[in-house]
Amino acid sequence: MKVILVNGSPHEKGCTYTALCEVEKALQKNGIETEIFWVGNKPISGCIGCGACGKLGKCFMDDTVNVFAEKAQSADGFVFGSPVHYASASGAITSFMDRAFYSAGRYLKGKPAACAVSCRRGGTTATFDMLNKYFTINSMPVVSSQYWNQVHGSTPEQVLRDEEGMQTMRTLGNNMAWLLKCIEAGKSAGIEFPEAEPVIRTNFIR
């Protein structure tokens, strides 16, 4: 079993990375393979709603989103990390997830997911809520922890001193590993993910 931890910060080894590393260590202790995937610090375009991915099988903008989509096919779970920018997720991770979920959501569906949020002081819960919405629109079990998945600090060293935040990350990793093993046991017992009904799309115009 493998979990991909997505670092949505423009800083490769900053505070968000520090939080994800703590989740990663807990996963590894439980025998789960891991990979930290950095979205990078180059501009990432948002989705332009062209629909080309429906024909191509991938986003027509061939960048880090498609690299992630390729890896996601063989992953069993995901943790998406973001710093807080103006009480919201980073622009990079927002654009990244918009396109990844729209063009490659089929590779994520039914797989456990969680987010980890890093901030200096405030805005974590708004960011936490924002990121979780990607999972709940795509039939992904959301993994929780003992508190909202957040750490505080302006530097990696300060984040490491956030004892409750670090414990929350470890609990998240342990809970993710437990759920992955439960799903694996269920599959071994013949329990498969529910078959989806044909999608019904409506609006409120009469």
Image: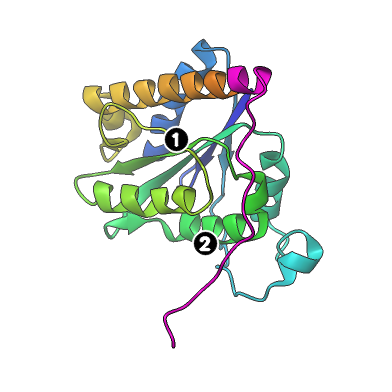
Q: Position of residue 134 (x, y in %)?
A: 47, 53
Q: Position of residue 28 (x, y in %)?
A: 53, 16
Relative vertical location of residue 158 with respect to residue 126 in this rendering, above or below? above
Q: In 3D space, how far apart are the residues under numbered discs 1 and 2 (Cα atoms)?
A: 19 Å
Q: Amino acid at mark 1?
A: Tyr
Classified by dominant secondary structure, the portion drawn in magenta counts as loop
The secondary structure type at the circle numbered 1 is helix
Magenta stretch, residue numbers: 184-206
Q: Is residue 180 left or right of residue 1?
A: left
**Magenta stretch holds residue 187:** yes
- Check disc 1 and report the residue beneath it: 17
- Check disc 2 and report the residue beneath it: 95
The secondary structure type at the circle numbered 2 is helix
Locate the N terminus by quadrant.
top right
Other residues around mark 1 within 10 Å, as few (<14) / some (14–19) / many (≥20): many
| Among the 4 quarters of the image, the one containing residue 194 | top right
| Colour scheme in use | rainbow
